[in-house]
Image: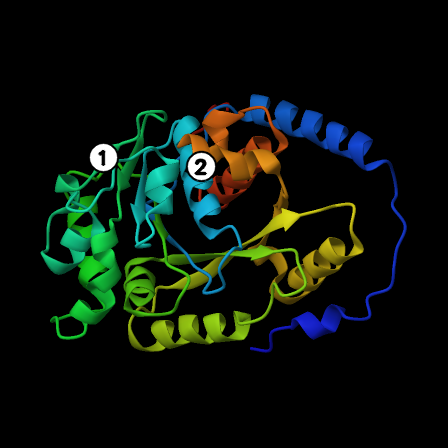
Amino acid sequence: MTIPTAADFADEPAGSSAGTPLADQAAYNVSLMERLARTGQYRKPQQTRVFVVANQKGGVGKTTTSVNLAAAMAARGLNVLLIDLDPQGNASTATAIPHGSGTPGTYEVLLDELPIEDAIQESPDVPRLRVVPATIDLAGAEIELVTVERRERRLRDAIDRYLGGPGSDIDYVFVDCPPSLGLLTVNAMVAAREVLIPIQCEYYALEGLSQLVNSIELVQQHLNTDLDLSTILLTMHDSRTNLSQSVAAEVRGHFGDRVLATVIPRSVRISEAPGYQQTIITYQPNSTGALSYLEAAREITERGAAPQDEGDVS
């Protein structure tokens, strides 16, 4: 698979804006609010969907995407499990989940085979959102896993046991990965059925993407034949710049309908929310960022929704 690179945009010609950015954004927000109001609760999937949110490049909105999609779906009536697999614990912070050293979390799930239900904490702000936190203890897990039996399948075994028992009501699982392609990310890819890649609409967005796609293909061939690169989400989009438009067009041209129609704008509010230990869904629910993540979540759920019964009106 040939992936475009940042160099493809070096000589991108300037274009003209079709309208006033503020007016366009206001109209877009109104249309989103109307659509989301009509949608109501999101439809459940035919079976539990397990996503790994991965990109070895840092700063692309990976954790932000994980927590906000999870919160958006839970806010619209779905049962969601968020697994923080990044030793930095940013997903735990953003969902107001305590994750000090020694707190039961993903380290114990991977290394000590702690059942997921014994590590789960309920989100204090978003009902139906359950979180398995990450602590700093997870930083050494890459090395410790090397000699462990079934080292690439530890997370999958734990998730399968949970979904087959106390977590049978879970509709979506999101696994937030560290910005690397080590054993933690491999565990997540083996555990997942779908890959969601956030790509920021900036010059260096596509650097390293070939390596990520190659890693996904290797996991598909050798460890998880069910894994599907199903979803691409464009983040940090600035409709005022030619560069954002060019990157978005190139990504859509390459990945086709795997790219969500919704884009996530560059937003101060989205960046502020984790500082208050909140997702954008609870921090500023009517902001452009919150509406965009709610719409992206709606798109994802519509793609995998169970068939509606005759006469079922949503």
State the image coordinates of residue 188 (x, y, percent, origin top left).
31, 60
Foreground tag (1 vs 2)? 2
Find disc 2 in the rendering and name its residue.
274
Residue 278 shows up from this direction: no
Give the total number of marks visible in the rendering. 2
Query: How did the renderer colour the structure?
Result: rainbow
Residue contact between numbered discs 1 and 2, judged by CB atoms under 8 Å: no
Q: Nearer the viewer, residue 244 or 140?
A: 140
- Work out whether mark 1 precedes mark 2 in sequence or the reverse, and give the earlier one: 1
Disc 1 on helix, strand or loop? strand
Q: Nearer the viewer, residue 311 or 125?
A: 125
**Type of amino acid under label 1:** Gln
State the image coordinates of residue 115 (x, y, percent, origin top left).
12, 47
Find residue 222 and name its label: none
State the image coordinates of residue 13 (x, y, percent, origin top left).
87, 64
Instruction: Determine whether 225 is above or below 123 in the image.
Output: below
Q: Nearer the viewer, residue 290 or 87?
A: 87
Residue pictured at 14% horizontal, 52% vertical = 108
**Type of amino acid under label 2:** Pro
State the image coordinates of residue 145 (x, y, percent, origin top left).
18, 69
Left or right: 285 as drawn, with respect to 120 = right
Find disc 1 in the rendering and name its residue.
121
Cα distance in 3D space between marks 1 and 2: 18 Å
Left or right: 250 as drawn, with respect to 79 = right
Residue 163 shows up from this direction: yes
Disc 2 on helix, strand or loop? helix
Left or right: 288 as drawn, with respect to 106 = right
Instruction: Determine whether 234 is above or below 117 in the image.
Output: below
Q: Quadrant of residue 239?
A: top right
